[in-house]
Amino acid sequence: MATPQLSPGVLTREVDLTVGRADNVLDNIGAIAGPFEIGPVDEAVDIQTEQQLINTFGKPLSTDAQYEYWMSASSFLSYGGVLKVARVDGASLNTANAAPGYAHTTNLKIKNYDDYNNNYAGEGVEYTYGAKTPGSYANNLKVCTIDDQADQRIGINTTNLSSFGATVGFGITTQISTTLAGVGTTSTFNGYLKGIITGVSTDTTNGNSTVDVKVVSRVSAAGTETSVDYGQGSSTQSFETGDTIYFVNNSGINTGTQTSAAGFAAGEVLDWYDQQTLGLTNSTVYWKTLAPKPRTNTYSEIRNGRNDAMHVVIVDDLGTVTGIQGNVLEKHLGISKAGDAISQVNSPQKIYYKDYLRDFSENIYAGYNPSQEEDGYRAANPVATGFSTSYTPYTTGEGVWGQDAQGVVFSALGNVTYTLGGGVDYSGAGGMKAELGDLVTAYDLFSNRDEIQVDYLINGPGLLVEAESQAKANKLIAVAESRKDCVAVISPDRNNVVDVPSTTTQTTNIIGFFSALTSSSYAVFDSGYKYTYDRFNNTFRYVPCNADIAGLMTRTNINAFPWFSPAGQQRGTLNNAVKLAYNPSKAQRDLLYPARVNSIVNQPGVGVILFGDKTALSYPSAFDRINVRRLFLTVEQALERSAQSQLFELNDQTTRSNFVNIVEPYLRDVQAKRGVYDFLVICDETNNTPEVIDNNEFRADIFLKPTKSINYITLTFVATRTGVSFEEVAGRA
């Protein structure tokens, strides 16, 4: 309330009626669901280019049930829109995986990122690594892993190692007597070097064996034990050729089990990591050519943890993915077994292998912890799980992966290659057939307008049974009707028009198909299947045109405005259409148009064009035209967003005036751009009555006279005699 003036003067005050504005909502977002070859399941993914479509959902396959979906998606993208793609689920769809023991877990289906986090990131399901893509696509991919299991491989000139205590998990020692030079001092180190046996191999042919050894510690003459890291060529940190070595068990050093009290002279001593190869089928690749040996990450080291680092490499072993055998798809080096590990001190980047692969791998998730004793492979192929300062290896609980790094010596698996398998595609014809129920579930992803923006619901192809095709189409219409901010675009069933020899039969089929679909101004029907080139399979294919119709509306938004018709020669030319499966004549179009079907025609010298702009509304109305429906969609969304700024304001003249000042300039702009002939905005005390105000409501009535597209042109040509006046003939004075 303004302060009253007590004496003559001028009072200046301001009322701001400029807050807020209205803008057109031109997102040009389409949505489609289908049985794509790869990609997350039951998740809407934004796709902007065909290449992104390939990278995320694969390429078109040779079966109708799959390529029609893919090429519909590609067709829409060619017009410049953004496409939300949802890969449907299927009863038979399974994820390729490697389970403990190298088997494959059956009925494993990791749908998407959230599904993994919620259901498959823990230890409840027995799989070691699983594909990020459900289906057969990832079968035969190899997940090659290596960690710091062993340091050296030592040759032994006997085949009877077990009698000398040469057992995985127990010890090997050698005496040390060397001079250590320090700064200004020289001292002699006497004692022994201790290691743990992590592998035993006997060559019965040549009478020689090898043992793989992890260097653990060195013990001084006084009995003080110190942990050491392997140092190649160091007499105090490695075993060397010619050293006298002793096999021991958990009872102590040189127990006398050897026939020679002097022990064995170490034969050839090699660096273990240098000998390791990826377990590939048709090629030999050494780990050392890919990365240095994994050891302990800095994060674990400063917390007294050890041996947490590992490498994971994913290889297209048989070339089934890239066409190149042995092609390395991904390298993840130096990731950690420690559940709390980060890349650097105080860095937010997690490097725990499960988290890292989840966030950065394009191909795999990690699941069941391979350090667990329940791992069938580990039970059949024992390895040292960790290394203590005695001769007894750590138990699984002591070195299990996923613990925080503090004070943990992590168990080791060494060099292990997992082959993914068990991935299964959709059931049905061609193995890529989507079922009606799964499609309905997928399109439900687009039903909530508050969560996801959609302008066009693209039907793509129908199903094998016409009734199911109609049910699918009606589902899209129901979603559009519920949202009231988009349109569903639908083509006839493939069997209605493709390879049907009679155009009369095609016409009857189309009318019959659409007669079972719901009347709605939020849907658009077309007559066509176009013939287009599939460069991926080097052939021409028939593809439904509904994605093109959505594309034409997108093109209209870009080149004109939503309230312009997307039909005709100016804006209605379809992309990449060689010919049509059905090219209706004028007489046939006269039958289709009253049946709510917009014909697509091939006009000589012009191309393939949309030749109608009706919605699927079954009764006469302004909303039975595409341009009028899209005018109201555009205006409604723009003003709805503007109205959000009025929420929780006071319902008084100032607020109402401010809203009118938002709406009227916007509508004048629409009028100037030929969207409406005229408009009226009422937002005052006449519709915001005391009762409305007391109910905490705010009302505005907006009247529009939409412009209409031209559907019918009559040209009358009159021939007259030479001496006749045109005014006389035309009846004009």
Image (tube, rainbow, N blue to C red):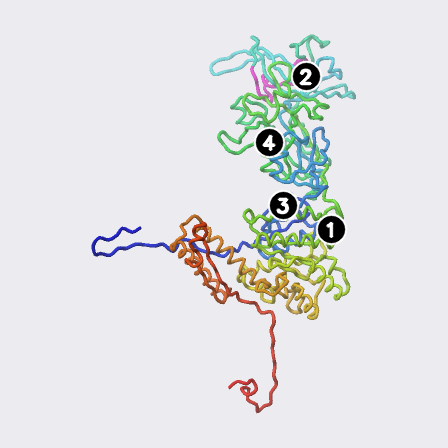
Can you identify the residue that label 1 sits on? 63
Tell whether position 234 is magenta.
Answer: yes
The type of residue carrying mark 3 is Thr
Q: Residues within 10 Å of mark 3 (few under 14, many from 20)?
A: many
- The answer to which image quadrant residue 503 occupies is bottom right
CB of mark 1 within 8 Å of CB of mark 2? no
- The residue to which callout 4 is attached is 353
Label 1: how many Cα within 10 Å (few below 14, some 14–19, many 20+): few
Magenta region: 226-247
Q: On the image, numbered disc 3 is attached to which residue?
A: 56
Q: Secondary structure at mark 3?
A: helix
Residue type at mark 1: give it. Thr
Instruction: Name the main secondary structure of what is drawn in magenta.
Output: loop
At label 4, which amino acid type do we have? Tyr
Disc 1 to disc 2, how far (Cα)? 63 Å
Judging depth in this view, the residue of 529 and 449 nearest the camera is 449
Mark sitting earlier along the chain (2/3): 3
Task: Identify the residue at horizontal 56%, vertical 63% (top origin).
Answer: 627
Label 4, label 2: how far apart the Cα atoms are: 37 Å
Mark 4 or mark 2, earlier in chain: 2
| Quarter of the figure with residue 227 | top right
Q: Are marks 4 and 1 in contact (CB under 8 Å)?
A: no
Residue 265 placement, left or right of 686: right
Mark closer to the chain start, 1 or 2: 1
Q: Extreme left residue here? A: 7
Cα distance in 3D space between marks 2 and 3: 54 Å
How far is mark 1 from mark 3, CA to CA?
19 Å
**Whole-percent x and y of residue 246?**
67, 12
Along the polypeptide, which appears first: circle 4 or circle 3?
Answer: 3
Location of mark 2 (residue) = 266
Residue 100 in view here: yes
